[in-house]
Image (spheres, rainbow, N blue to C red):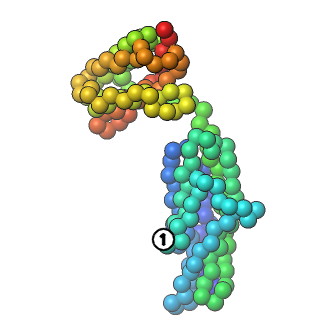
């Protein structure tokens, strides 16, 4: 007997930075005893998979891992399961990389960063113990990292950095606080 679908693979909307796995053997089966399935993944247009989509034929796992540069991209994939007798079952799945228009803000986040705008020094106050802080420029590149802040307050010297908008990431033991800051001179 030919392979068959045990369920339809749902279309996917993936946020940049998220990793989504689809185990293809969860969606296909074959009732013939000892009839192994092999899988193939291709785009509908038969073009190469986008760089953020990979297929591992060893464990039959399809992985989506887009970054922000892929926001808005969409691909339609054809998944084919083939048995030992060259019989096939197919399904299609559309994958869209979601567009992120802002940063999620935790309303319970008690982290305070001042002054904004900053000239020389940023002050950080919080209710939790600070593990480390990172400062990213508007391109997302790391420009400053400080690991020696172990209290509930901290100071970060930023006077040597160019004027602009930055993202400050404050890391605690079990969460991260992200704050937008501006540096002017």
Q: Is residue 166 visible?
A: yes
Q: Position of residue 65 (x, y in %)?
A: 54, 51
Q: Residues within 10 Å of mark 1 (few under 14, many from 20)?
A: few
Q: Is residue 108 visible?
A: no
Q: Position of residue 23 (x, y in %)?
A: 51, 66
Q: Label 1, on which residue?
A: 59
Q: Quadrant of residue 126?
A: top left
Mark 1, secondary structure of its residue:
loop
Residue occupying image coordinates x 33% and y 28%:
146
Image quadrant containing the N terminus:
bottom right
- Horizontal side of 120 relative to 139 (left or right) equals left
- Horizontal side of 112 relative to 28 (left or right) equals left
Q: Quadrant of residue 91?
A: bottom right
Residue occupying image coordinates x 53% and y 18%:
164
Extreme residue toward the front, this view: 160
Where 160 falls versus 11 (above or below)?
A: above
Q: Quadrant of residue 7?
A: bottom right
Residue occupying image coordinates x 61% and y 41%:
69
Q: Position of residue 170 (x, y in %)?
A: 37, 29
Where 54 falls versus 72 (above or below)?
A: below
Where 109 falls versus 159 (above or below)?
A: below
Extreme residue toward the right, this view: 45
Q: Position of residue 73 (x, y in %)?
A: 67, 47
For this rendering, which residue is in front, 74 or 147?
147
- Horizontal side of 103 relative to 123 (left or right) equals right
Total numbered circles: 1
């Amino acid at each position: 007997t030919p392979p068959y679908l045990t369920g339809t693979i749902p279309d996917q909307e993936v946020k940049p930075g998220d990793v989504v796995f689809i185990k293809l053997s969860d969606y296909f089966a074959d009732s013939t005893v000892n009839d192994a399935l092999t899988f193939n993944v291709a785009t509908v247009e038969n073009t190469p998979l986008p760089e953020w989509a990979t297929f591992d034929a060893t464990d039959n796992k399809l992985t989506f891992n887009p970054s922000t540069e892929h926001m808005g991209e969409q691909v339609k994939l054809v998944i084919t399961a083939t048995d030992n007798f060259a019989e096939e079952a197919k399904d299609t799945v559309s994958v869209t990389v979601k567009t992120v228009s802002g940063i999620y803000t935790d309303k319970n986040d008690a982290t305070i960063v001042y002054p904004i705008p900053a000239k020389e020094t940023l002050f950080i106050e919080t209710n939790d113990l600070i593990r480390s802080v990172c400062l990213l420029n508007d391109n997302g590149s790391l420009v400053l990292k400080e690991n020696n802040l172990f209290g509930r307050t901290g100071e970060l010297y930023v006077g040597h950095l160019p004027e602009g908008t930055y993202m400050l990431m404050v890391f605690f033991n079990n969460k991260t606080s992200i704050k937008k800051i501006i540096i002017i001179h």
